[in-house]
Amino acid sequence: MIPASFDYVRPTTVGEAVQALSDGGDDAKLLAGGQSFIPVLRLRMGDPSLVVDLGGIAELRGVREEGDAIVVGAMTTHHDVTRDELLGRHVALIAEATRTVADPQVRHRGTLGGALAHADPAGDLAAPTLALDAELVVVGPSGERRVPASEFFEDYFTTAIGPTEILTAIRFPKYTGWGARYEKFNRVAQAWSIVAVAATVKVDGGKITDARIGLTNMAGTPVRARGVESALVGQSMSEETVRAAAQAAAEGTSPTSDADAGSDYREHLARVLTGRAVLAAAG
Amino acid sequence: MTTMDRPVQEIGRDRRRKEDRRLITGRTRWTDNQAITGLLHISIVRSPFAHADIKGIDTSAAKQVPGVVGVYTAADLGADAVQLPCAWPITKDMKAPQRPALAGGRVNFAGEGVAVVVARSAAIAKDAAELIEVDYAELDPVLDMEEALKEGATLVHPELGTNENAQWVFDSGEAGSGGSAAEAIAKAEKADDQVVVRRRFRQQRLVPVFMEPRSTVVDPTGEQLVMWSSTQIPHILKTMLALTLGLPENKVRVIAPDVGGGFGGKIAVAPEEVVTLLVARKLGKPVKWTETRSESLLTAHHGRDQIQDLTVSVTRDGKITGLDVKLIADMGAYLGLVGPGVPILGAFMFNAIYKIPAYRFDCTNVFTTKTLTDAYRGAGRPEATFGIERMMDEVALELGIEPMELRKRNWISHEEFPFTTVSTLTYDTGNYEAATDQAMAMFDYAGLRREQDERRKRGDVKQLGIGISTFTEMCGLAPSRVLGSLDYGAGGWETASIRMLPTGKAEVVVGVSPHGQGHETAFSQIVADKLGIPFDDVEILHGDTQSSYRGLDTYGSRSLAVGGIAMVKAAEKVIEKAKPIAAHMLEASEDDLEFTAGKFGVKGTDKGVGIADVALAVFAAHDYPEGIEPDIDAHATFDPENFSFPHGTHLCAVEVDTETGFVQLHRYVCVDDVGTVINPLIVEGQVHGGLAQGIAQALYEEAPYDESGTLLSGTLVDYTLPSAADLISFDTANTSTPSTTNPLGVKGVGEAGTIASTPAVVNAVLDAVRQYGVADIDMPTTPFRVWTAINSAKGTAGRGDEANVASPGAGLGSNVKDSSVKNQGGAL
Ligand SMILES: Cc1cc2nc3c(=O)[nH]c(=O)nc-3n(C[C@H](O)[C@H](O)[C@H](O)COP(=O)(O)OP(=O)(O)OC[C@H]3O[C@@H](n4cnc5c(N)ncnc54)[C@H](O)[C@@H]3O)c2cc1C
């Protein structure tokens, strides 16, 4: 399918990109890996007048350690996230979740920043980002600001990024030594999540000492299963306690109903998958 | 020149496919990458509504777009006056609506074309198409087949006065091939020693989803109008275009270059092909149409979509006494090329491998305001196989007989071939026992039953289910006289020509038209063996009506079983023509010659000439016997006397996650008898692909419509196709009882996997969850449906008012411990 025509620029610095966005007006859009945006263009669900390609900005790529944080450039591809050693060691949950995204072709082009900016409720990377209490670094004409993940996802396909702003990096606190599991439920391997659960837990001497749990596709935005987290902390690790705690997983969610799942089924899945995710993370 | 000693026998060799390098790398000519100077591009404006009157079309803005060459409505092209062909009028009084190339006054399904833009680039055409304003007055859609047949229903085509296309009935009592099913069932209802089982199954709507979207290029500038098209049927298309549009057939050439899949979906005279042709003729310029994936999902014909009501009467010891099949089949908005006949092909296959003494088949075809349906891999036979193989499990459950045992009690034993069935076909060969024994051993049936039992006892979250499908099919469409008796619009013969080149190489021109099957390789193997020349010296030419002027193309697993035989016959003729010349060259009598391994030898001597020597001799033509022509090329047409009947035993084990409803394939074994195997690698590939598609019908695929008649699976995000990651490694094997209806002994393998696998998988899913009181789950058995079925059935005991015939310890080995479940025999 063929998109409507648009102008195209490929800046080499974040500053130039912000300038291009500002100059481009309401209709200017950013292009990252294109794995969500290009289908939108091709199906003519959007017709921007200007496309600003972030692919030429080297500073947006890569993973680095900054004190207590692991900082991932927005243009780091899914593939690179799954292979990154720092992330594997300190932020295993995001690497785990990223492995379940689509297929190798998509993972070679799609980016973490693009996925979070796109904010598809069925996307797999928002829930772990929320669960991990990440901070999102956003740069606009008036400089840089940091948005906590809990304030970043506003609604279906809507984030705190302003129209002339660019998401430049994601800062994850370190979860060194925590177990992690992304339990994704979908019909076929390369499909989006019907429901998924991102869990990372710290187990010490047979006791769960800390837990972070995020839910995918249980509302317009990712949801933090705080009820489960608090029910888990301080418990000794057993299948029974985990399953019992997981019963709170659907609290505060508002899942949709569609052909793949009714809302009650989604709630049920959230409970089942939360139990499985925590057990796997702790195991 | 000498002929190389022929290498090893080619037939039976697992050669890698010689066409794969160019197909897999994409370095070939498809339709869409034909580069023609001055080519113009088409975009078609399509209706978003399922059913609407067209009040007006404003094309003025589109015409202003720079680069636009023309904007046409149906009337501008005469496209509304076209009657696209249906070649299979299944009954004399069949109702057939006019099917235009573009809708004029009314659209009858969402996606129907209403206008067309022609421009210098595809992008400009698309931009301009967006500017066309169509004023629609919406009409009620017609979506439910049973509602559509009721008195007072909204009519898709009011001018027909009904939504019923046709009713087609076969009754073995009337045909004299068996008793009356109605009588058998009535009798069983009164008999103490018989049971009557009634079930309704649903065949969901599917999309063939070939890899290469359809594309057509028409160049009208030469003496012959040339159409390149991504089609399975270049020959039929050529003749049909001539008949439909009143073109002289000699002025049309159709080329199917490399074609990326079809699965039946490219057996069509597509409206877009005709529109492209009309536009090209109007402008006198070459024009191209290439669809998008969404256009393809929406408008290329769909498959399946039936409601099946089956009634079986059976003695309590498991002998079937009668089978009644009542179908309702959705045609969609119009009739496709063979659409109405697709469900009718099932008429011959519901009785399957079983000796059923009384049989009735009654199919009503219905119009709805949906995309039309037509052939899709298996065409009628997967539907029939699903119905009967699901039913065998249901009957087994009713009777408390192990499901494989029930099949054995009813199938045709290998001593009974040839066997004439209740639906009048004569199965030439088969050995269901051999295939089944091998499959059961490979599968470790007993072991898996044990494991299933253990998991049940432990109450595992993941329960095991085991499903069987013992199938046969008719393939090698088809004996022309059979097609004639079914009112089909053409014969079923096939043609091949062999051209012997001066250097001893052979060009084989075939009438079948490959689109991914590996014909070039398999056919080269056959011809190499028959002529005794190296595999690499054989070139298969296909898909161009200029070189291959006679053919009936590729579908219905016919290319080898019919086309392959034409090649054998042509090769025999080459040898026959070469013989007198060889005798002349050897100064021997023809009677003293024998042809082996590519060489004419004089018996009892070491004198001989190769077929290549003869080819050179007739090329030079300096010295050949008087009274014959210097030519050893040959042409042959083969019209089969019968179908071939591949069969097989497919066994599937699934794990059902009872907490989530997710179904995971656990083991899949199939042993197929496809007769003589020309190339085991290709056979295995066909089986694998077929399995993937049949399994996908059971677990993944569906093309649903919403209440306004909008297709909900308009992209591949919504139409769930499995990939290798979702499937398991299949264990396949072959038994072989060569067909006696053709000299190669081949059957067909293109559709076998698709036909057999769907019921095996669904039977397995149900086998895993019947213990919870689940009676049936519609396809695809999605996690949501499985979970819902388990949860709505849990704790229910079934309808206690029906006969309680489930006996402890027997049958599917499930559900006997608990008396609440015992009752369920009657409910299932
Ligand atoms: C077949 C297929 C299957 C998929 N399956 C999954 C899946 O299972 N799970 C999953 O999570 N995802 C899936 N995806 C989506 C994939 O993860 C995408 O890569 C991701 O959603 C978008 O990332 P991108 O880099 O491609 O962004 P793009 O598509 O380029 O951009 C997406 C949106 O974000 C905006 N944007 C991009 N970068 C920035 C930035 N730095 N600052 C501000 N705005 C920005 C763009 O303007 C655009 O609106 C799938 C995609 C495909 C094609």
Image (tube, helix red, strand yellow):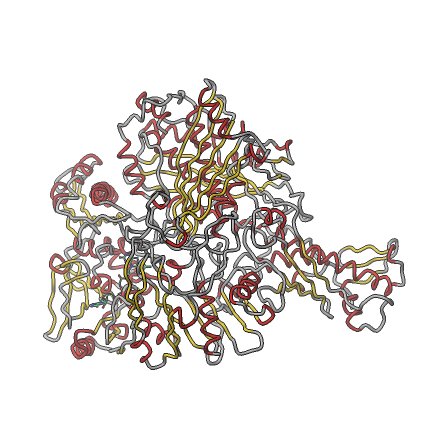
* Front position in the image: B335 or B563: B335
Across and down, in percent, residue A241 comes to 17, 36
Residue B266 versus residue B684 in the image, above or below:
below
Q: Which image quadrant for residue A135?
A: bottom left
User: Which quarter of the rendering shows the N terminus of chain B?
Assistant: bottom right
Q: Between residues B413 and B335, which one lies in front from this camera angle?
A: B335
Is residue B803 placed above or below B743 in the rendered structure? Answer: above
The answer to whether residue B247 shows anywhere in this view is: yes
Q: Quadrant of the C terminus of chain B?
A: top left
Q: How many marks?
A: 0
Q: Left or right: B133 with respect to B255?
A: left
Residue located 47% across and 66% down the image: B273
Regarding residue B157, the answer to whether it shows in the image is no
Asked whether A3 or B608 is in front, the reply is A3
Residue B658 position, x and y percent, is: 30, 36
Residue A235 on image: x %, y %: 14, 38
In the picture provided, is A11 more to the left or to the right than A232? right
Residue B620 sits above or below residue B778 on the image: below
Seen in the image, is B149 located left or right of residue A195?
Answer: right
| Image point (33%, 54%), residue name | B713
Q: Position of residue B727 (x, y in %)?
A: 41, 47
- Location of ligand 1 given as a quarter of the image: bottom left
